[in-house]
Image (cartoon, helix red, strand yellow):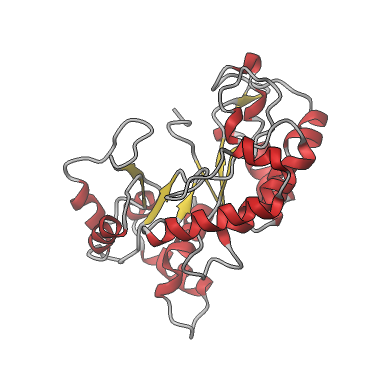
Amino acid sequence: MKNFLTTALLLTCFFAFSQQETIDQKVDALLKQMTLEEKIGQLNQYTGDNAATGPITIKPDEQSEIKAGKIGSLLNILGSEHTRQYQELAMQSRLKIPLLFGLDVIHGYKTTFPIPLAEAASWDLEAIEVSARIAATEASASGIHWTFAPMVDIARDPRWGRVMEGAGEDTYLGSRIAYARVKGFQGKNLEEINSVMACVKHFAAYGAAVGGRDYNSVDMSKRMLWETYLPPFKAALDAGAATFMNSFNDLNGIPATGNEYLLRDILKEKWDFKGFVVSDWGSIG
């Protein structure tokens, strides 16, 4: 939990810190002040009703929970006017930790671009990066910090309904596009006001669900995993992706949400990923 909190607090508090101390020092100092309840609160994400893609979790007492530091991030809150209102509530909390605002900005925000699969069919990496940059500029102006994209799952079964969110069946093309889209969303660095954090999903092998059935099991060899399904994730990481999202499936019998091989052995240790992993919608349950 400490690794998740350290990275999340680093990202949310970046602009509030003076230049006299390093970001890491400020985050460590902040962590030492936090109660266990406040730490758990930073891991808690609610959704608003502006663009719901699942059950609404905003509650009548949400304002008091934000003021108490019991919520760390919100999704589906649209418009800078609304995000500013929530942020002002967060600034009334004991430690004044800003909220993160996330949204599924998949193929454009206000300006709509072709779906990711259609963009991939163009093989135009420059245009794909530009479309992500435009989406980030528009989303950030609306108060969004974090997009739940790109989806880099390799998909070779057309029965799987989420094929349209990715780059298709080719690992090489998928890797190149993953890199381009992360660069587009995040820009030169996350200090830019028109950049948003990318969230690479779904880690890992979600596109290989048995029978193309969503949330189903995945059964594959390590060779297939490493040669076909992991390279786009590594390319996104090489592009500087700030966050990852785990997948709904289990991999060879172990759920991705609690898969030590995926999350710790590969992502954190072998790949030295410094960001944090967010669970997909209800995926732990």
Asked whether residue 273 appears in the rendered view, the answer is no
- Residue nearest the observer in this picture, 40 or 92: 92
Residue projecting furthest to the bottom:
20
For residue 53, what is the image quadrant? top left
Asked whether residue 57 appears in the rendered view, the answer is yes
Position of the C terminus, as image quadrant, is: top left
For residue 162, what is the image quadrant? top right
Please state if 36 lies on the left or on the right of 22 as rendered. Answer: left
Residue that appears at 68% across and 20% down? 157
Whole-percent x, y for residue 216 in the image: 58, 19
Residue that appears at 31% across and 59% down? 80
Whole-percent x, y for residue 114 in the image: 56, 40
Whole-percent x, y for residue 221 in the image: 79, 25
- Residue nearest the observer in this picture, 22 or 129: 129
Whole-percent x, y for residue 31 in the image: 42, 63
Please state if 83 lies on the left or on the right of 197 as rendered. Answer: left
Relative to 22, does residue 213 appear above or below in the rendering? above
- Residue nearest the observer in this picture, 234 or 71: 234
Please state if 275 lies on the left or on the right of 36 as rendered. Answer: right
Residue that appears at 81% across and 35% down? 227
Please state if 191 lies on the left or on the right of 82 as rendered. Answer: right
Total labels: the figure holds 0
Residue projecting furthest to the top:
211
- Residue nearest the observer in this picture, 50 or 231: 50
